[in-house]
Image (cartoon, grey):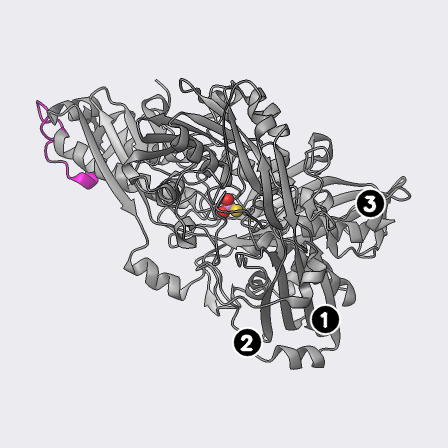
Amino acid sequence: MSTTPRIGDSISRTDGVLKVTGNAPYAAEHFPPGLLYGWIVSSGIAKGRIKSIDDSRARAIAGVVEIITHKNRPHMAFLDGSYGDDVAPPGSPFRPFHDDKIAYSLQPVALVVADTLENARDAAALLDVTYEAEEHNTDFGIALADKYEPKKTRDTFEKPKPRGNAKQAFADSPVQHHATYHSGNHHHNPMEMHGTTVEWNDGKIVVHDKTQGAQNVQAYLSGIFGFSKKDVRVMNPYVGGAFGSGLRPQYQVVLATMAAKLLERSVRVTMTRAQMWSHVHRPEAEQEVSLGADQNGQLQAIINKATTATSKFEDYMEVIVNWGLMNYKCENAEGEYTLASVDTYTPGDMRAPGAATGMNLFEIAVDELAYATNVDPLQLRLLNYSEKDAMHDKPFTSKALREAFAEGAEKFGWSRRTQAPGSMREGTDLIGWGVATGMWDAMFQKTAARATITADGKLEVASATADIGTGTYTVMTQVAGDVLGLPLADITAKLGDSDLPAAPVEGGSWAAASTGAAVELACKSLADELYKYAGKVEGKPLEGAKRDEIAFVDGFIVVRANPFKRVSIKDAVAASGKDKLEVEETAKPGILDMASQLQKSRNTHSAIFVEVKVDEELRIVRVTRVVCAVAAGRIINPKTARSQILGGVVMGIGMALHEETYTDHKLGRFMNHSLAEYHIPVNADIENIEVIFVDEPDAEVTPLGVKGLGEIGIVGTAAAVANAIYHATGTRVRSLPVTVDKLL
Ligand code: MOS
């Protein structure tokens, strides 16, 4: 018998074997009978209209079934509103193949559908499209001249409340640091590209889609194509990474469904790797930071302003400047947000949206203040440490950042650091040690889960949430095991199916806390049922034992005080006279939670320490050591939790050193659209990363005390690397990534 998985156990991912053996089918790995293949033809211009499409050469290719464009597509919703989704920002969502207008480079203009992928691709190359181009602008620097404050924002956006008089206090500060920072466009590039297989079954469809939210896509497709929701089932049980790129439905799911509906056939459409740059991305950003302090480094004023890029059709705005304002004790502080629109697709959420940009850039400014006042950068952070959320003037449900600094510094050996840039070296390498703070939200979203136990004692827990590589299956399994005391082999977690109990998109680092809470509730209800039927088992072994006097251990319902008095779970199910017991519960913030939310802030924090070695002459940077100490409440699974932080830290190193999408403004196109040219860290770039979870009990933040870990790892990491580079070289780079050219 396998052991019971419990909360706190470092068990391996329950879907791990399926994944590494290639037995977990992704969206584009389903083969319904008669499957057709679609190839997306992308716009050659960045703005204007399609003048003509001549498909005669393309149609001559054997195997071509149809070529779909705005002219012959099936009926689809007309109004913008029908194309909204749970995550959409205000504006007019992009409507694929709606008309002849082109709003961004690589916008899909046609779908060639054929019997094989190769035939579809061949035909696509022969499609003759002509355009009438209009003048476009993809240059954020130019767009900045017309920056604006959007009238509407998403609910998750919050404008910062000013405190004190920041401008005056800055003017009066003996030490003033003022600088503008920049971060480039980033594209998500999960291993699995955006793909969809639509199975056509007599007017009903099963949509295998690469998405972070099956029900979000289900509602979206139903709205656009006029399907009744019950005729659209969206499935995403395995997702090969997403990082936010699958929060909103992507255009290939529309194209595949469109073709299936028009042809009444099953159809698959997958973006090419290059087309992954025709969709969502993290927006380019500029952040102007003013920090006023006294000679000792005590903050007196913070002014934090950000402008980010958005498209011409939607106002995507992320929380950039609030993090710095929340994190530091300072009586005078204010922040400001503006957008600048360019002719690209609408940017969107990418791992720690807003914080990855805003906190990383802010933490470089904080480092600059440390040198301006000649205070150790860690000491400066401790000197300005805020016990409460300084922007909202509220306590946190918990904040063990001080402990994270202490444990991280100890592990890293920070006390051996010398302050002067270039003062530490090893042969031809300059050594730099940098530190930064990370911060993210600890969110809890309404989520439902079902728990079913069958007569053979097998438990299934199910929710329409997703596992985008984060470990949701494993978390669900552990929470269920913890409540019902069943062995691992008897527990199955099910997710990634719009037919399952309602769940939001998996994002915002809320899935472990929210799905976990739902599974716990459902399993507790099921435990109540089992207890009830256990009382009916012959011989009544539990006689007299109240509900709170029993425990669920190794497949048995036992009396705590006398474990010999027990009933097996199988016998309890049998005593019900049914073949299974099933309950569904919804976890959501209650009245008390909501009152507490008004009074307290909920956040994760981290302290990141980085060592870089920079070749003195070649200026090549290696990140040789990272210690990331995270305060994220209760850790359900230290092993999968560590993996989340490792991934985030690697992405943070990429943000610091490698990652940027470059645009040819003449063509209005993202140019480095391949993994050969869009640089992300590879194994050779990653050396020693240590992850510490500091003890942070928090009974209030979410029902399980869990805060979430998917995003915090990237926040602060890029800053710590940039700060370490300054410490090594004395060259301050205010524009990420810090590429070699900027250091020469
Ligand atoms: Mo995350 S950017 O909410 O997938």
Residue 312 inside the magenta-drawn segment: no
Q: Please, is residue 572 above or below residue 187 in the view? A: above
> Camera-side residue: 489 or 209?
209
Residue of label 1: 296
Whole-angstrom CA distance, mark 3 to mark 2, is: 40 Å
Tag nearer the camera, 3 or 2 = 3
Q: How many residues crowd around disc 1 within 10 Å: few (fewer than 14), some, or many (20 or more)?
A: some
Whole-angstrom CA distance, mark 1 to mark 2, is: 22 Å
Instruction: Name the residue: 60% across, 29% down.
Output: 124
Q: Please, is residue 218 above or below residue 19 in the view? A: below
Q: How many residues crowd around disc 2 within 10 Å: few (fewer than 14), some, or many (20 or more)?
A: some
Q: Label 2 amino acid?
A: Arg
Helix, strand or loop at mark 1? loop
Residue of label 2: 163
Tag nearer the camera, 1 or 2 = 2
Most frequent secondary structure within the magenta stretch: loop
Q: Label 1 amino acid?
A: Asn
> Camera-side residue: 448 or 400?
448
Q: Please, is residue 641 above or below residue 387 in the view? A: above
